[in-house]
Amino acid sequence: MVTERIAMWSGPRNLSTALMRSFENRPDCTVLDEPLYAAYLSATGIDHPGSAEVIASQPTDWRVVAREITTAPVDSAIQYQKHMTHHMLPSMDWKAFSGLSHAFLVRDPLRVLTSYAKVREEPTLEDLGLPQQVALFEEFGGPVIDAASILEAPRESLRALCAALGIGFDEAMLTWPVGRRDSDGVWASHWYSGVWASTGFAVSSPGAADPLPARLEPLLERCLPYYDRLAPYVMAPRVENGD
């Protein structure tokens, strides 16, 4: 079986786990949850919630991970890989990942920061992965989708994403059963409570973001140029007759 291996590159608090749920609910798709997380923690020594448990759960050599996610047999037509952009370090040979179909999930940095600040008081630009996301896009290219579009028009946005990836859209992507999955990383208890309680994308209009703590305003200013760099490539939801 020839498997379409999709690498979705996102920063934290970007709707990334919900999008992984969406793809996992397809009968033709399996998922990998942040396969480079342990390699990233091992290489950087950064202290994240449950770091020791994460490192024990995955290979810490990025070369091993690269081989597994690009060549290991997969028992499904599609493999969806949820990646965090900051896990891709400059010391890794990015060309080892060139065989994947790359895509990019972005979100307004204001909303990212107000969300991330609730779980990590002093996030950095590197934590948010925006410079890495731009560098990955410039290296590999691929479709760019905005979390706001998915929330505003889930069906149309996912159909456009699937078309750009060369796969068919499946209505099963719009809803999923509540609860945790065996595919969730061991870090899920620290980050996934909202997704565990969900059964689909919360269709919404953008509305006003939560207030940003004043101490993070300089960081927001540093984030915006990276988001603006990718904004021209964001796909608009494709509404078709009869929808």
Image (cartoon, grey):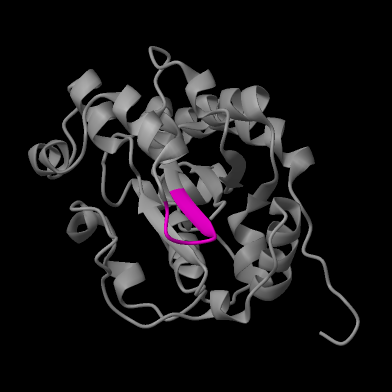
Seen in the image, is 111 located left or right of residue 116? right
Residue 34 included in the magenta stretch of the image? no
Span of residues in magenta: 74-81
User: Residue shown at 43%/61% (left/top)?
Assistant: 30
Tell me which corner region of the image, top left, top right, bottom left or bottom right, holds residue 87.
Answer: top left
Residue 75 included in the magenta stretch of the image? yes
Tell me which corner region of the image, top left, top right, bottom left or bottom right, holds residue 54.
Answer: top left
User: Residue shown at 70%/45% (left/top)?
Assistant: 143
Above or below, 123 relative to 116: above
User: Residue shown at 31%/77% (left/top)?
Assistant: 197
Where residue 61 appears, as percent x and y from the top left, is: 25, 24
Farthest residue in the right direction?
241
Farthest residue in the top direction?
91
Where residue 77 appears, as percent x and y from the top left, is: 54, 60
Whether residue 14 is visible here, answered yes or no, is no
Where residue 48 appears, as percent x and y from the top left, is: 19, 38
Q: Quadrant of the C terminus?
A: bottom right
